Image (tube, coloured by chain):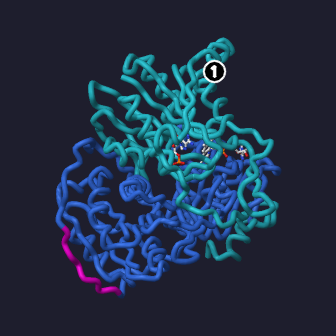
Amino acid sequence: MTALVLVEHDGGALKDATLPAVTAATKLGGDVHLLVAGEGVGAVAEAAAKIAGVAKVLVADGAPYVHQLPEAVAPLVVGLMGDFDAFVAPATSRGKNVAPRVAALLDVMQLSEILSVEGPDSFTRPIYAGNAIATVQSTDAKKVITVRGTAFEKAATEGGSAEIAAVAAGEEAATARFVSAEVSKSERPELTGAKIVVSGGRALQNGENFSSLIEPLADKLGAAVGASRAAVDAGYVPNDYQVGQTGKIVAPEVYIAIGISGAIQHLAGMKDSKVIVAINKDEDAPIFQVADVGLVGDLFKVVPELTEKL
Amino acid sequence: MKLLVPVKRVLDYNVKPRVKADGTGVDLANVKMSMNPFDEIAVEEAIRLKEKGAATEIVVVSVGPAKAQETLRTALAMGADRAILVQTDDEVEPLGVAKILKAIADEEQPGLVILGKQAIDDDSNQTGQMLAALTGWGQGTFASKVEIDGDTATVTREVDGGAETVALTLPAIVTTDLRLNEPRYASLPNIMKAKSKPLANKTPGDLGVDVTPRLKTLKVVEPSKRQAGVKVADVDELVGKLKTLGVVA
Ligand SMILES: Cc1cc2nc3c(=O)[nH]c(=O)nc-3n(C[C@H](O)[C@H](O)[C@H](O)COP(=O)(O)OP(=O)(O)OC[C@H]3O[C@@H](n4cnc5c(N)ncnc54)[C@H](O)[C@@H]3O)c2cc1C
Ligand SMILES: Nc1ncnc2c1ncn2[C@@H]1O[C@H](COP(=O)(O)O)[C@@H](O)[C@H]1O
């Protein structure tokens, strides 16, 4: 059994999201090879070769992959899969975009967002926004898997010395063309990897309150900032702040939910945090049912006081 | 241009799912079922494209039991023109659904297929991408904006680090994210009108598609429950707690 893991990167640097996927692939029991698809990705490949437990890094370096469009990357992966028994991708927006395309081309049913490897062909995965956990067994000869990053340890970024091998680049995607990207810039830690996350909800009322209340607290704690969908929908913060079933999945050491009611779709994204702290003026808010520490109070009073006293 | 919109009947998003005691799945007996929320957004987007003159006909399709007709009628009441039910009592996995949709796309020749990004029951997030693979078309997944201009769809996508815009040659696949639009409610007259709109019945067999599942569900359990913790009285006590937890020095 040899697994091919798709490396998550932004062209310049390898992204941490790769590391839990490597761990999950290791648990399949065979060799782990990595695939770096991009243009000018020598540095990414070097970093990938250092990851502990990796036997080989395949590099497809060329113009067709510069924006990692699935229309170009999926055929590349399918072309390589003759040598592999499993294709593993992180359950990031990129991984989710490309893996099912690979699966269908291989005529394989994908296992989405696995939480554990139970055996060579059985896995657990969340369904119904994490309100149920299914153990599923794949009967396909090849496995296509996406990995929930919070469910696996990160593989070590040092200690490996994998061989790096170039693979021939394929065709440009004929059906899709990259137009532009709007990358949100932030000095704060990345939401999915942060040790502490401070999230705000609809109760913040507007973007100004969000930045004058949530952000100083996050800065004081060195935390990433997240939000409920309601806060994103109302335009207080950009969409990539959303935590939940259909947003980002986080499991930090500490998750601080401020003015968030705790709808199941929100809980789906954060209930595996080690410690959950909730501030809400409604003592019956469902968020308190999962919070380790709850403070019933008006956030407009409590949050500035908390920021000051920390 | 014709638009094809697949809609799935799922447990209503307001209902708390209950795992069956025998561990075989989630209890769907006597609970409210609705259209998958992302598919409502897909139907709404299709209607808006038609209202703008970018599309001429909206065909909705559902794969599922006879009851999925209700979901199709809801889409017709919102403004879709015609419906196809691919009826089966078996659970069809995303790969099977994608194959059925490919067969329907071959028959209907749509210019654009708009799906939800994920069904909130299986949370697979696969079908649209799989259909794109089977048709060989471009895919604009997790869309927050869709514009049609001639034979190109320009799609803005919600991605981890912000947003990305791609241009797809039609025909193409789009999957919807939550912020694409806010779906309308069907008015009473439109609900009445929808009753006489055409609804065709097919089976996976009619379309020559084998939907034998590839995954076997061995068991379904509830996730480990979190215990509610303590409530603190004020900020000082909260700061104290955060200190004992080692969050702050
Ligand atoms: C298909 C689908 C997918 C979804 N996906 C997600 C998702 O990924 N993530 C997500 O978050 N949501 C998601 N949702 C939405 C979800 O159902 C809830 O609507 C949303 O999480 C509510 O956000 P909220 O808690 O900020 O707002 P509300 O539910 O309105 O809660 C606001 C809370 O703030 C409290 N409050 C008000 N004023 C104050 C004050 N002054 N001080 C302190 N507390 C105050 C209130 O008591 C209340 O509890 C999804 C919904 C659907 C249908
Ligand atoms: N049984 C089905 N009938 C019609 N459409 C479906 C069905 N299953 C999935 N879809 C479509 O595919 C999307 C993604 O579903 P999934 O890949 O299961 O998360 C849904 O939002 C629907 O648009």
Front in this rendered view, residue B158 or B224 = B224
Dot 1 falls on a residue whose secondary structure is loop
Let me know if residue A28 is in the magenta part: no
- Which residue is depicted at the point 24% across and 71% down? A43
Quarter of the image for the N terminus of chain B: give it: top left
- Which residue is depicted at the point 24% across and 56% down? A65
Which chain letter matches label 1? Answer: B
Percent position of residue A33, x then y:
33, 76
Quarter of the image for the C terminus of chain B: give it: bottom right
Vertical arrangement, residue A30 with respect to residue B154, above or below: below
Front in this rendered view, residue A206 or A194 = A194
What color does chain B have in the rendering? cyan
Percent position of residue B192, x then y:
67, 14
Vertical arrangement, residue A263 with respect to residue B201, above or below: below
Q: Is residue B169 left or right of residue B229?
A: left
Tell me which segment is drawn in magenta.
Answer: A160-167
Percent position of residue B118, x then y:
53, 46
The answer to whether residue A15 shows anywhere in this view is yes
Vertical arrangement, residue A279 with respect to residue A233, above or below: below
- Which residue is depicted at the point 34% across and 86% down? A160
Front in this rendered view, residue A156 or A96 = A96
- Which residue is depicted at the point 30% across and 69% down? A82
Which residue is labeled 1 in the image? B186
> Looking at the colours in the rendered structure, which chain would you say is drawn in blue?
A
Judge the density around disc 1: few (<14), some (14-19), many (≥20) Cα neighbours within 10 Å.
some
